[in-house]
Image (spheres, rainbow, N blue to C red):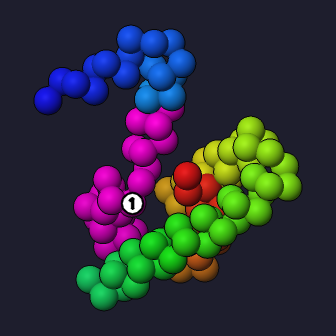
Amino acid sequence: PLRFLNLFKDKTTAALATTIGLQSFGDTFNVNDINFLYLKSVLGYGQSQVGTFSTAMGFSQIVNARLMKQMSQALGGAKATLLSNISWALGMLAFGTSKSSPQLGAALALLSGGHL
């Protein structure tokens, strides 16, 4: 169970593993329970509305895969990743401060550019 520690023997793979680990904190699969509580308590969403939001979040991941392919080809990997990370950060900020469905939709649009 500790074989993953081998990733930290080399400086490059350690940086990569740390980056990927930190980026996964906001992944919907890791925070679905927290999202449910937020959507229920702040927006008054029920289970079906949370399910719809989760479906939309999954769809946004597909959108991002297509966007990232085009952005990587046009801008190169480093710039595309930078823009994606900026979009993800802004999307998480918008998501965490949304108080209405339209604001949540705007947050989802920003998150669509940020899934890595």
Q: Which residue occupies 43% across, 50% down?
A: 26
**Residue 65: x percent and y percent?**
60, 64
User: In terms of image quadrants, where is residue 108?
Assistant: bottom right
User: In terms of image quadrants, where is residue 44?
Assistant: bottom left
**What residue is disc 1 on?**
28
In screen coordinates, is 29 left or right of 93? left
Q: Which residue occupies 31% across, 19% down?
A: 6
Q: Secondary structure at mark 1?
A: helix
In screen coordinates, is 72 left or right of 103? right
Residue count near mark 1 (Cα–Cα under 10 Å), binned few <14, some 14–19, many ≥20: some
The kind of residue on which mark 1 rests is Thr
Q: Which residues are magenta?
A: 19-43
Q: Nearer the viewer, residue 44 or 25?
A: 25
Q: Which residue occupies 38% across, 16% down?
A: 8
**Residue 81: x percent and y percent?**
69, 44
- Relative to residue 103, is residue 110 depicted above or below? above
User: In terms of image quadrants, where is residue 62?
Assistant: bottom right
Indicate the quadrant containing the N terminus: top left, top right, bottom left or bottom right: top left
In screen coordinates, is 35 left or right of 71? left
Determine the residue located farthest toward the bottom in the rendered image: 48
Q: Nearer the viewer, residue 57 or 74?
A: 74
- Relative to residue 76, is residue 46 depicted above or below? below
